[in-house]
Amino acid sequence: MTEVAFFFAGGGTGGHIYPLLSVAEQILARRPDAGIHFFHSTRSVDERVFAKIPYARTPLPATGLFFHPLKLLRFVLTFHQSYLLAKQCLAARRRPVVVGAGGFVAAPVCRAGRKLGIPVALVNVDLLPGRANKLSARWADEIFVQFEESRDSFKRSRATVSTVGCPLRRGFERPDREKAIADLGLDRSKNTLLITGASSGSMRINEAICTLLPQLSRFADRWQIVHLTGLDNYQVVLSRYHGAAIAHRVLDYYDNMADLFAATSLVVGRSGAVSVAEYAVAGVPSICMPYPYHKDRHQYFNAGKLVEVGAAVIVDDVPDLADRAGWLWEELQDLMTHDEKRREMAAACRKVARPGAAGDIAQRLLQMAGE
């Protein structure tokens, strides 16, 4: 076989990394000798994820695009540096394919691929693309999107746009509920409420839940909590659980999310594109608290796709803690009380779940590589 190599570019958040890892898994399942190389950012979340993964990787100095003069200058300089590094790596391989997934490291790699005449693909999992993917789209040959509505955002691109869903790790194909229960010491006879702020955690969600711990004690006989705090908030949140009547496990991070979702009865979390895809494929009812400070409010649109089919409810992450916690408590109290309502929401997840996205994208990338 002729050598073939796939260069994945994305970073800065888990939402820009995990979809690419999912596609890489599926490529290797089909072509075990394929070369895999990741370009990622220098942020700590990237280092944490890739420290446990055996793929070749190159951190790039690229920074985000802002229009303040000094920040804009820094963007231009780091973009060019990243472009040159990526171009050098790509030129050294005989049959490379570039796959970007957003974040400020993706664009210079996609541009390098285009300049070298290499096939370039883009994975866009948010309903509304961010700046990096809008920029990268001009160099892409094919764009894979999670939501049909995303097509409108790429009308000016020459690329083919395919609606395939969000690529998820292979663990979601056969999740091991019992493993999560054993790992976390959970009680099989109780429902599990999962609190998560995604890969970086959410201080605002953490605050709201900690405020509600006295009320949540009413459900101590039937429910338990798994709370993923994020690295920065772990000690503070752990201290707030001291003396809580409801059974709980407080962790900064958990790797095997597919297994944990399989053991979850209800989740409270953000609504990044990967998160909503995971909720849907896992069949978990969700209370979505979209991150409120994105200018395009894309997390609201992502969550809206679950709400449309009856798989989720939205609670606004408002600045006032009392209001935020109060509105969250209204939804928690309702859903933790009514088992049938949760069952209906879980069934509704099937209407939007697309579990085969990673495999579909991998197959198309292999075709782009001439396989």
Image (cartoon, rainbow, N blue to C red):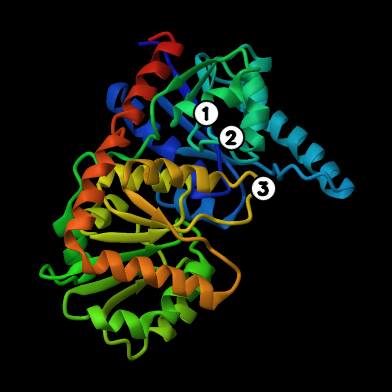
Position above or below: 221 against 121:
below
Mark 1 Cα shell of 10 Å, populated few (<14), some (14-19), many (≥20): many
Instruction: Give the secondary structure at mark 2.
Output: loop
Looking at the rendered image, the disc whose residue lies closer to the viewer, 2 or 1, is 1
Q: In this image, 338 relative to 360: left or right?
A: left
Q: Earlier in the sequence, mark 3 or mark 2?
A: 2
Residue 212 x %, y %: 40, 79
CA gap between label 2 and label 1 equals 7 Å
Label 2 belongs to which residue?
129
Q: Amino acid at mark 1?
A: Ser
- State if disc 1 and disc 2 touch (CB < 8 Å): yes
Label 3 belongs to which residue?
295
Mark 3 Cα shell of 10 Å, populated few (<14), some (14-19), many (≥20): few
Position above or below: 72 against 333:
above
For residue 150, the mark is 1
Q: Earlier in the sequence, mark 2 or mark 1?
A: 2
Among all residues in the image, which is located at the extreme top? Answer: 370
Residue at image position (15%, 72%) is: 187
